Image: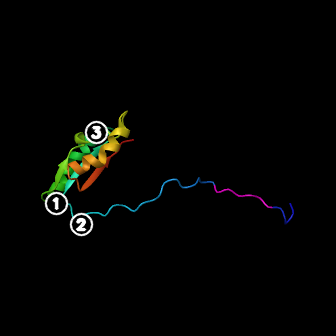
Amino acid sequence: MTASERYRVVWPRGARLVEIVPAAKRPPSLEGKTIAFLWDYLFRGDQVFRILEEGLKERFPGVRFIGHEAFGNTHSGDERKVVAALPGRLRDHRVDAAISGMGC
């Protein structure tokens, strides 16, 4: 190889296709807020949500919860439809924050 030979180098990662957006602003407290539970119906989310609900109610008076049943299965044959409908459903229930449970 001579000093004048050049090789094209390609970065092993692909081009970024999705723009990174900043995370939503967090509420200063969950007191008096409405929290949605979202679930993919895997790995005991129903049990975990009950524990979380009990603990959060003790810590934040007036916190309210909307169960995962109101939003549908986020990992199923209908997941595209369920996820597409989430913004409207969250708005309809006046949700301030969401907890999404995912099992592997």
- Helix, strand or loop at mark 2: loop
Horizontal side, residue 89 vs residue 84: left or right:
left
Where residue 3 sits, quadrant-wise, is: bottom right
Main secondary structure type of the part rendered in magenta: loop
Viewer-nearest residue: 35 or 50:
35
Closer to the camera: disc 1 or disc 3? Answer: 3
Where residue 97 sits, quadrant-wise, is: bottom left
How far across and how far down the image is residue 93, in percent? 20, 49
Are there few (<14), some (14-19), or many (20+) residues within 10 Å of tag 3? many
Which disc is residue 16 wearing?
A: none
- Residue annotated with mark 2: 28
- Residue annotated with mark 3: 72
Kindly give the residue lying farthest to the left in the view shown.
Answer: 62
Q: In the rendered structure, which segment of residues is drawn in magenta?
A: 6-11
Specify the amino acid type for callout 3: Gly
Q: Residue shown at 21%/44% (left/top)? A: 67
Viewer-nearest residue: 88 or 4:
88
Residue contact between numbered discs 3 and 2, judged by CB atoms under 8 Å = no
Closer to the camera: disc 1 or disc 2? Answer: 2
